[in-house]
Each structure stands twice: as structure tokens, then as C-alpha cells.
Image (cartoon, rainbow, N blue to C red):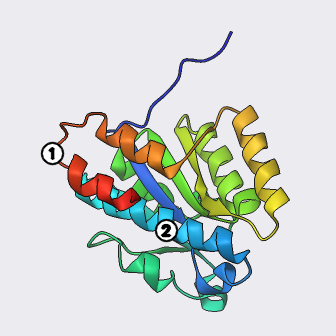
Amino acid sequence: MTAPLTLCNPEQSLLVVIDIQPRLVEAMPEPEAQRMMEVGTMLLQAAAALSIPVLVTEQYPQGLGSTCEEIAAHLPEGVTPIGKTGFACTCAEAFRHQLRRSGRQQVILTGQETHVCVLQTAAALQAQGKTVFVVEDAVCSRRPEHKIYALERMRRAGVIVLSGESVLFEWLRDFRHPQFKSLARLIR
């Protein structure tokens, strides 16, 4: 028996941007990193327009730098990156606090690396009963096969793997949505 198909619900969604920092991005294959940045930026713009809360983390920012400017420029007002040393975002008390405060049950993950911080965050969130989505074109790993294996592992564990466009159109749901025209432009 298969589980019912779950769509991203804008009233229940929380967007998480994991460790998109210069020193990490530089280690990624360029096309993958560029696509992650483009789709991540699109999702941040959509989240802002739809009032979907955003959390951002930075892995050991003292050594790996702050969030890349391309991403930081699109963070909603008042969103401050959360520093962490553990690989799962839930290792950081500030992340756990803001997650609880959001009251959201669906968590959409973007960032890097897919097989480390994204995977461990997905596992921790699932253990808390959250519905976890991983945006396959907004995550990357230094080695493409690591991303492939991590996505497959998460998929088998019940994490929903989808594209950035799927997230956007699931948030909108209807061509008549007041934000449809402005947000549909983000994917052109």
C-alpha cells in the first residue's frame, strides 16, 4: 500500500536554506551550485511574497563564511542566519526554537551538502513528526553521486523529493491566485 500524495501547503510550509556559504559553494560542481543558487533564490522570493517563514543556517561561519550574498540579498526582513557546528540543523538550539515558534508542520529543505547536512536535517525533522520535502534542484554535493544516493535514501525513508517549480505551483495551487503572474515570472 502506498502513502497518499502530499502537496506543499503554504499555510503549513517553512523554507529552510542550509549552509549556502562561499567556501562550500566553491567546492561544488559549478552547474549544480549555480542551479542551487537560482532555485534557492526563486523559492526565497516566492516565500517572501506568500508570507512563508524562512530559516537559514550557516555551518561553522567563522571558517566557511557567511551566507552567500546572492542568497542573503533575498532573505526576508528580520531573518538572521543561525550558526551551527552540528550537521543537522536541529543541533542548533536557535533553530529548534524558531522551528517550534513557527508552528509549521511541513519543512522544505534547500542547500548543501545533500548527503550530509540536508540528509541529517531531514532525518531529525522526520523524527519530530514533520513532513519533509527536499528540493532536488536546490541541493547539491561535491560529488554528484553523493547527491543521487542521498536523495534515493531520503526518498525510501518517506522524504518527499520534488523540484523548485513543483514547490512554487503547489504553494500557488490556482492560476487565479493573486500572486500567480508575478511569481510565475520567476521560473522564466
Give me the disc on residue 38. 2
- Residue positioned most to the front: 188
Decide if residue 77 is on the left or right side of residue 43. left
Residue 106 in the image, given as x and y percentages of width and height: 45, 40
Q: Nearer the viewer, residue 139 or 101?
A: 139
Classify 48 as above or below 181: below
Q: Residue at x 68, y 84 (%)?
A: 26
Quadrant of residue 62 within the rendered picture: bottom right
Q: Is residue 130 visible?
A: yes
Tell me whether circle 2 and circle 1 mark residues in contact (CB < 8 Å). no
Residue 140 in the image, given as x and y percentages of width and height: 68, 64
Q: Residue at x 39, y 59 (%)?
A: 188
Residue 73 in the image, given as x and y percentages of width and height: 36, 80
Residue type pointed to by label 1: Pro
What secondary structure is marked by label 1?
A: loop
Decide if residue 128 is on the left or right side of residue 107. right
Residue type pointed to by label 2: Glu
Q: Nearer the viewer, residue 19 or 145?
A: 145
